[in-house]
Image (spheres, rainbow, N blue to C red):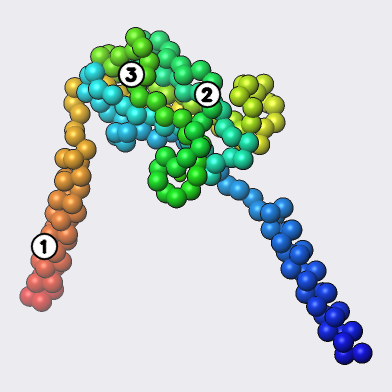
């Protein structure tokens, strides 16, 4: 009688464990992070400078990711990668596998240049699965489209200076706060 009870309890526990093991992957919802990352991150370059553009999807999709990057210069001329398979790797070194497509503008686009002052637009679209461009509205597990801009300007503040200015600004704010507090304390005391 007791043996049967133990056996039954064991069966129930085993069933629960198996159920949980099967339930986890079915119910797990993967949240994908996607977008465009620029280097330099400010997106501002001197004339004839280069910019690294990465379009990504994280975590890596099991079906793979395909897509393209198109850059439009200030005169409206397009420079397009065409449809490419995104690389599976870890482009941002955060320990999570991702799908990414990285290009350097203008280096990777023969005939392109960054000698025009003004705004350049970046468009990236991506989707999971086969390399053929899906029809509009066609259901795919993931799909994304992103816009970003970068600028060519004579007035580019090097990022190293921006980095140095920020702590000075914080220090100045703390000093001003101290001065204000100190003056206020005195006026209350007098
Ligand atoms: Ca990553």
* Outermost residue, bottom side: 2
Q: Is residue 89 visible?
A: yes
Which numbered disc covers residue 152?
Answer: none
How far is disc 3 from disc 1 in space, using C-alphas?
Answer: 50 Å
* Outermost residue, right side: 1
- Labels 3, 1: front one: 3
The residue at the point 25 percent across, 14 percent down is 115
Q: Where does residue 142 sit, x and y in percent of width and height?
A: 62, 36
Query: Residue beneath label 1, please?
Result: 179
Query: Residue beneath label 3, please?
Result: 106
The residue at the point 64 percent across, 27 percent down is 130
**Whereabouts is ligand 1, in terms of quadrant?**
top left
Return the disc, 3 or 1, that comes first in the chain's sequence.
Answer: 3
In this rendering, would 127 be left or right of 156? right
In this rendering, would 120 be left or right of 188? right
Which numbered disc covers residue 84?
Answer: 2
Return the disc, 3 or 2, that comes first in the chain's sequence.
Answer: 2
Q: Residues within 10 Å of mark 1 (few under 14, many from 20)?
A: few
Q: Nearer the viewer, residue 99 or 174?
A: 99
Q: Quadrant of residue 13?
A: bottom right
Q: Where does residue 150 sit, x and y in percent of width and height?
A: 34, 26
Return the disc, 1 or 2, that comes first in the chain's sequence.
Answer: 2
Residue contact between numbered discs 3 and 2, judged by CB atoms under 8 Å: no
The residue at the point 54 percent across, 27 percent down is 85
* Mark 3 within 8 Å of ligand 1, using the beta carbon: no
Q: Secondary structure at mark 2?
A: strand
């Amino acid at each position: 009688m007791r043996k049967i009870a133990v056996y039954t309890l064991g069966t129930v526990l085993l069933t629960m464990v198996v159920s949980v093991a099967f339930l986890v992957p079915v119910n797990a919802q993967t949240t994908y992070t996607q977008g465009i990352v620029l280097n330099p991150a400010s997106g501002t370059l001197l004339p004839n400078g280069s910019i690294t553009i990465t379009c990504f999807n994280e975590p890596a999709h099991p079906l793979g990711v395909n897509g393209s990057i198109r850059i439009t210069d200030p005169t409206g001329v397009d420079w397009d990668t065409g449809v490419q398979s995104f690389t599976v790797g870890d482009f941002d070194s955060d320990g999570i596998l991702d799908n990414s497509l990285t290009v350097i503008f203008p280096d990777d686009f023969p005939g392109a240049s960054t000698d025009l002052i003004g705004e350049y637009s970046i468009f990236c679209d991506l989707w999971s699965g086969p390399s053929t461009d899906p029809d509009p509205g066609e259901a795919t597990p993931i799909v994304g489209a992103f816009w970003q801009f970068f600028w060519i300007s004579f007035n580019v503040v090097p990022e190293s200076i921006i980095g140095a200015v920020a702590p000075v600004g914080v220090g100045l704010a703390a000093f001003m706060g101290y001065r204000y507090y100190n003056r206020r304390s005195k006026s209350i005391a007098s």
